[in-house]
Image (cartoon, grey):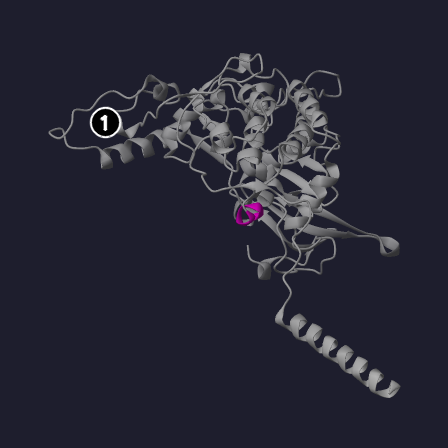
Amino acid sequence: MSARELPRSFGAYEIVRRIAGGGAAEVFLARARSVAGFEKHVALKMVPARMAGDPEATRRLIDEARLTSRLRHRNIVQVIDLGEVEGRHYIAMEYVDGLDLGKLLERLKPLHALPSPKVASFITRELCEGLEHAHRATDADDKPLRIVHRDVSPSNILLSYDGEVKLADFGLARSADRPSSTQAGVIKGKYPYLSPEQVRGHAVDARSDVFAAAAVLYELAVGQPPFPDAPLPLLLERISRGLIVDPATVRPELPETFLAMLHRGLHPDPAQRYQSARDFGEALSAFIFTEGPPPEQELVRLIELVAETRQHQMSPLAANLPTQLSDEVTRIEPFANIRARFVSGIRATAPSPASAPAEAPPAALSAFFDEPPPEIPESAVPEPEPVSVPVSDPVAPQVVRATPSYAAPVRYAPLTAPPPKPSQRRHWLAFGLGALALLAAILWQLRGR
């Protein structure tokens, strides 16, 4: 939906602009007005107009509102209202004045800068506190809801200009009172942040969100997700086997304690990971305080470095303003679809029988396919040399593979913006003022004689 198609009025709200949109929902910035000049900005999440008549899409939105309304925590975006206007349901949510973590990383890339390990740990620690609240939430009868977010990723982590960190988008969350949210044979979430058990189609619990939080921490520290980009079946295989790129090869200056937290959080075996978001958060807190004072203000200055403008001063349908949420699409895809694409790709690239004999693929591929994939050449599933990564933490070292693809030199982001380069106009102005001062001095000397 373009800006020209946006309704100026939507029930009790005035639409300001479109923030983001994916396959299942759109998010708009809106203004609520009331008596005596009262005004408040909110974020409206709604089913896209083309899907307004889809009962399944509407049900998911309503379920998300009901679930999130039970979560009241400073690190979770709050739900204000659930409503309907002309048959189109919406959720009115707390508006976070800032940008999402994915957008922050995107804007730091041209500067070849990354958050310091302390700032990266602070962001992830705040994320873990929100996750822990969701994991421990109960219903009105004090029964555990057993919520699992299942879509923790940079685009769903919002950063305010005041240094707040808030988790958003529980649209794919699984809970005890949402049995229909889990379907057999379906992958839900953004692929680079899926846990191995999600990829294999196993039951997930809070440790799956811990893995995703560790993947976010890895990207903050290294500048890329822990699993390199690859054709989808190969990417899923790497995730299921825990074949991460060794962070020490990309950022050798990272502290050993920090590397140990990454490896434990990204362990492919849930029993070897941090067993709760609280455990992970406590480890992060210990690391933060060994590095110096809490970094809230450092985070604020980092955000201000890449922010184009504060968003609360906006006119309706304002253009060219920074987005709060990314357009990254969360995937909900059956295994069968992935397998079909994999098979067709292999058939298109496989050599003729006369050129090379085909061998069976690794058994790990059959872990997330309904049936074993067809025979493929060994070259279709590359096996890079293993690299042993010793760590000082009691956690056993992992074996990680692949060569890092992010080889560009990086530095920690400066805490303040670099001084602007003087323009030619400023040069001429300084020259003119200097000439006038020199002339005044000469005249003063002549007058004294």
Check if residue 109 falls in the magenta segment.
yes
Residue 393 location, quadrant = top right
Residue occupying the point 38% across, 35% down:
230
Q: Position of residue 414 (x, y in %)?
A: 64, 45
Above or below, 180 against 113 in this view is: above
Q: Quadrant of the N terminus?
A: bottom right
Drawn side of residue 403 relative to residue 109, left or right: left
Drawn side of residue 235 relative to residue 288, left or right: left
Q: Quadrant of the C terminus?
A: bottom right
User: The residue under label 1 is which amino acid type?
Assistant: Pro
Check if residue 411 falls in the magenta segment.
no
Residue occupying the point 52% across, 38% down:
223
* Outermost residue toward the front in this view: 449
* Outermost residue toward the left in this view: 354
Residue 253 location, quadrant = top right
Q: Position of residue 323 (x, y in %)?
A: 61, 50
Is residue 308 among the parts visible in the rendering? Answer: yes
Is residue 82 among the parts visible in the rendering? Answer: no
Depth check, front residue: 140 or 339: 339
Q: Position of residue 429 (x, y in %)?
A: 70, 74
Q: Residues within 10 Å of mark 1 (few under 14, many from 20)?
A: some
Depth check, front residue: 164 or 415: 415
Q: Position of residue 97 (x, y in %)?
A: 71, 47
**Would you name the residue on which mark 1 appears?**
377
User: How many badges with numbers are in the image?
Assistant: 1
Drawn side of residue 431 relative to residue 114, left or right: right
Give the main secondary structure, helix, strand or loop, of the magenta stretch. Answer: helix
Above or below, 346 against 142 in this view is: below
| Callout 1: SS | loop
**What segment is highlighted magenta in the picture?**
107-111
